[in-house]
Amino acid sequence: MDIDEVGEVIFNNLNDDKDNQSNSSENDFSLMQRLIDAYDYQLLTYQAFGQLASVAGYLYWYVSTIYGMQVINNKYSANREELVDPDPDIPALAGAEILLIAQSVLLQVSRSQYFNFYLNYNRNNLNTAKSATYEIYLGDFIELIAYTLSYLGTKQIYEINHSNDNPFVE
């Protein structure tokens, strides 16, 4: 049973409890609330992983930038022959891959939140909650497209710079 199916089971049980409110006890509601909280906690755990992975991806891109600056500085150094140029393409590609994976995780989290938004909002706020979670889901989807394009471009640059046909690579 995946996380979305758990949300559906919880929602169905909540609706059954609301329909049979005279028969439900305080413990039933507490159990349902604990299940909802466990579901939300699991989503937040995935979200935290995705955010931490994003930070790691950006750190790789930062290292790539510093390596690129070092390559340029080395080009004009007096002792050029003694210096070893770092390869900025390697951390750039790694960062792009990590960011793509991280955004995929974040998209799945927002998808789960969108399809299960009704678990955390009362009936008065359902339309607003649905709209808000949809906007988050859509934004994460657009970000995934952007990271995919960044990955594809970075991979092409890596392949060009590491092919034997490139006269500018030593």
Image (cartoon, rainbow, N blue to C red):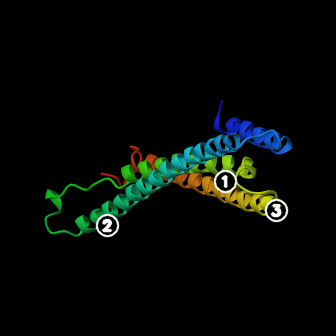
Rendering coords of residue 144 (x, y %): 61, 53
- Residue 47 placement, left or right of 127: left
Q: Of tags 3 and 1, which is closer to the observer?
A: 3
Which residue was labeled with disc 1? 141
- Please state which of residues 64 and 162 is positioned toward the viewer in this rendering: 64
Question: Label 3 to label 2, Cα distance in Å?
Answer: 55 Å
- Mark linked to residue 124: 3
- The local secondary structure at tag 2 comes to helix
Category of crowding for the residue at label 3, using alpha-carbon neighbours closer than 10 angstroms: few (below 14), some (14–19), many (at least 20) = few
- The percent position of residue 78, horizontal first and vertical second, equals 15, 69
Instruction: Please name the amino acid that badge 1 sits on.
Output: Phe
Q: Is residue 135 left or right of residue 20?
A: left
Give how far across and how far down residue 48 sits, in percent.
Answer: 49, 52
**Mark 3 and mark 1: span between their CA atoms?**
28 Å
Q: Which of the 4 image quadrants contains residue 71?
A: bottom left
Q: Position of residue 27 (x, y in %)?
A: 67, 41
Position of residue 102 relative to residue 4, above or below, is: below
The residue type indicated by label 3 comes to Asn
> Which of the labelled discs sits on residue 69, or is there none?
2
User: Which is more toward the observer, 77 or 139?
Assistant: 139
Going by the image, does 155 lie left or right of 35?
left
Of marks 3 and 1, which one's residue comes earlier in the chain?
3
Q: Nearer the viewer, residue 155 or 111?
A: 111
Element on which disc 1 rests: helix
Q: Residue at x 67, y 50 (%)?
A: 113
